[in-house]
Image (cartoon, rainbow, N blue to C red):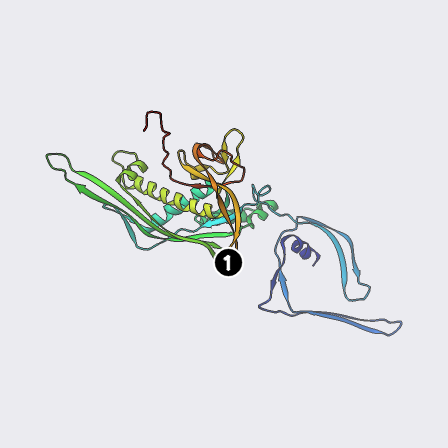
Amino acid sequence: NALSQAVRMVRGVEVETKRAFSFMYSESGKNEKTKDVWKNSQKVDITSKSSGYIKTYRIVDGPNRRTDGTGWVVDIVASVPRYQALGQKKDHLKRIALVPFRASKPTYALGAVKIPAGQVSSLFAQKLNEYMIQARKFRVLDRDYSFEVNNEKDLLKKGGAPLEDMVRLEQRLGTDYLVVGTIREYTITNKVLKPGFGLPAEVRSTANVILEFKVIEVATQQAVWANTKNMVYDNKALAQAVPIPDAGPEQYQQALLGLAADEIVNEILDVIYPIKVMDVEDQVVLNQGGKRVRLGTFYKIEGPAKTVVDPDTGLRIKIGGAKTTTIVITEGKPKYSIAKIVEGNQDVKIGQVCRRTQVILVAPSTKKDK
């Protein structure tokens, strides 16, 4: 019982309340000198469960009968190993899992080629995980390779792994957020143009990707964000995405799903973890990098925010100020990115929020302009 209590102190207690089990403890005796007969009993109607490993223990005192005669007491010092995942000692990142999106049809047409829905869903899940991991704002939990992971755990269990490894095997992290969705449309249509006058025919392609997605807070099952992305790419955009002559369906599939994953991951992070200014001494340094932040992308830094109260819900909402700054990304790193100011307020502060934007820069007028 003392060893069980030591495990509960470290790992917590799971109390079963739906099904009650009775446990009866009783003892009796007789004092031969005084002829007194004594009895003690107690009943427990709630069971508790807790599993774990005891590495070492020693008895400090006892067992000793309680002064009131109701039972026994033993004092122990136990060493209960607890595994801490790599990289979790210094940060408090929330956990997120991206589930493969559902397919609305059995196949998707990329031109004349039919792509199975399972292949599209699997590749898109891979792209989502890739982009979310590189954002470095969440601990991304894998949900695609559970079979392989469980096989590795079973192999270690059968091989008599050391106690520390067995503790690691029992750790399975739960997620804070779950991303789910549906692939409604994923097509490339080709149109053949015949200019005439002996000129060769020209093929123009248009891609359409429609995705529905939700971000669910697992603890409460509340949807914290939901949206439908309808993305259309014309012939020019496709040529930029796949700058390969005579590219095949595989190249277009990779490019399109990468662009779609980039859009969704950016939107999720803009809601939960928007990009912020991290340093402004010699240059503007942003606190996110990787594939999320691309060279040449413009961002608008919001001015000092003020807090207002929604009269309907009573929620406090931060509103970005009017004094904005436009920056452009000049260098990307895995954990951060560097930008330069191209327009607007020069007094940028650490912690200001950045939002992606599309801007048209106007060249300054010259003396010859009238």
Which image quarter is the N terminus in? bottom right
Above or below 360: residue 114: below
Q: Is residue 320 visible?
A: yes
Residue found farthest to the front? 370
Residue 209 percent coordinates (x, y): 32, 48
Helix, strand or loop for disc 1: loop
Relative image position of residue 267 (x, y in whole percent) = 43, 46
In this picture, residue 81 sits left or right of residue 272: right
At a point 45% along the width and 48% down the height, the residue shown is 268
Residue nearest the observer in this picture, 157 or 336: 336
Q: Position of residue 5 (x, y in %)?
A: 68, 57
Q: Is 41 left, or right, of 237 in this rendering?
A: right
Quadrant position of the C terminus in the picture: top left
Closer-to-camera residue (331/366): 366
Disc tally is: 1
Residue at numbered disc 1: 311
Q: Position of residue 129 (x, y in %)?
A: 43, 45
Residue 100, compared with residue 283, is above or below; it is below
Visible in this render: residue 214? no
Residue 67 lies in quadrant: bottom right
- Mark 1 surroundings: few (<14), some (14-19) or many (≥20) residues within 10 A: few
Tell me the amino acid under the disc marked 1.
Answer: Pro
Q: Nearer the viewer, residue 30 or 310?
A: 310
Residue shown at the point (26%, 44%) measured from the top left: 206
Task: Give the residue at the far top of this rendering.
Answer: 368
Seen at 80% across and 59% down, the residue is: 64
Outermost residue, left direction? 197
Place residue 197 in its image quadrant: top left
